[in-house]
Amino acid sequence: MSNLRFTLKSAEGGDEAVNAADFASFLSSLLACLSALEDETRVQAPVEYKVVGLEVGSAVIEIRPVSSGDLDRSAERVARTFEEGFAALENDEIRSTPFSRRTKARFLQLAKPLRRSTRAIEFRGTSQTVTLSRREPLRDLPRPKTIALSRGSMKGDVDAMNVHSKPVFYLYPRSGPTRVRCTFGPELLDQLREAIKRSTTVFGLMEYEAENAFPVRVLVERVEVNPPDDQLPALISLWGAAPHLTGSQSTREYLDGLRDE
């Protein structure tokens, strides 16, 4: 099983202790980054992160991802993808990776302690050791440009709803983007409560960014909760449902006519 080992080094060097706020900030950013990678890699089982090493008097922590639901396959995928992303971060190439903008931002947050009193962050993975050090600041992500607005619909699972200040929830499609941010008006609140954790189709104004074929935000105007998959008719149940559909034609003649049209 792959372990993720991190060492934060003080800016003063030597045996000087690392600032506790830096260490706490890094650990919080790390867990947020790993959570984003779970969405990014579409894990099949929940992943937990066990602390298997914590050295006394030093800012060293070793974490083991575990996913007992699928014999650690999801955990291995997250660990491997994290190692690739951290290497890209060290080379200041995180912007050119295929990760979503959200995941790229999470990786950039890992370097935040370097702006304060931390001199270096060393990561040791399965195949390499990578060190982020104080140097030229890593480039921020460019502000995305909206290239299109259009009305449409999108299907996915509704989750992570927040009704404070500006009501928002996230739609998790079965294919395409990892998740899509959806804003809505108070008149839809009761319908969305019914939709939590269920397959739902949202309708509204969709916002697209440059070089992205899928919407990144939806201003929701209407929602429809979809029936569970086990309530959908099986293909075999449609057999004989329209016995006179082809009229006097054979099935082949009828299909050939549709193709010609």
Image (cartoon, rainbow, N blue to C red):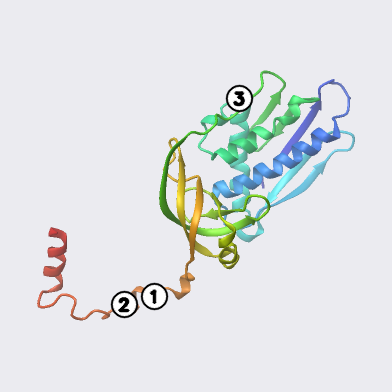
Q: Residue at x 31, y 77 (%)?
A: 238
Q: Secondary structure at mark 2?
A: helix
Residue 257, above or below 26: below
Q: Which mark is residue 139?
A: 3
Q: Residue at x 51, y 30 (%)?
A: 96
Q: Quadrant of the C terminus?
A: bottom left
Residue under pointer 2:
238
Question: Looking at the picture, how far across and down is residue 165, in whole percent?
Answer: 67, 50
Query: Mark 3 near mark 1, Cβ–Cβ under 8 Å?
Result: no
Q: Residue at x 19, y 76 (%)?
A: 245
Question: Is residue 235 rendered to the left or right of residue 54?
Answer: left
Mark 1 or mark 2, which has the lower sequence index? 1
Q: Is 225 or 221 nearer to us in this picture? A: 221
Q: Quadrant of residue 256?
A: bottom left
Q: Is 144 or 93 nearer to us in this picture? A: 144
Residue 9, above or below 6: above
Residue under pointer 1:
233
Q: Which mark is residue 17?
A: none
Inter-mark Cα distance, 1 to 2:
8 Å
Q: Give neighbour class at mark 1: few <14, some 14-19, many 20+ (Cα, 10 Å).
A: few
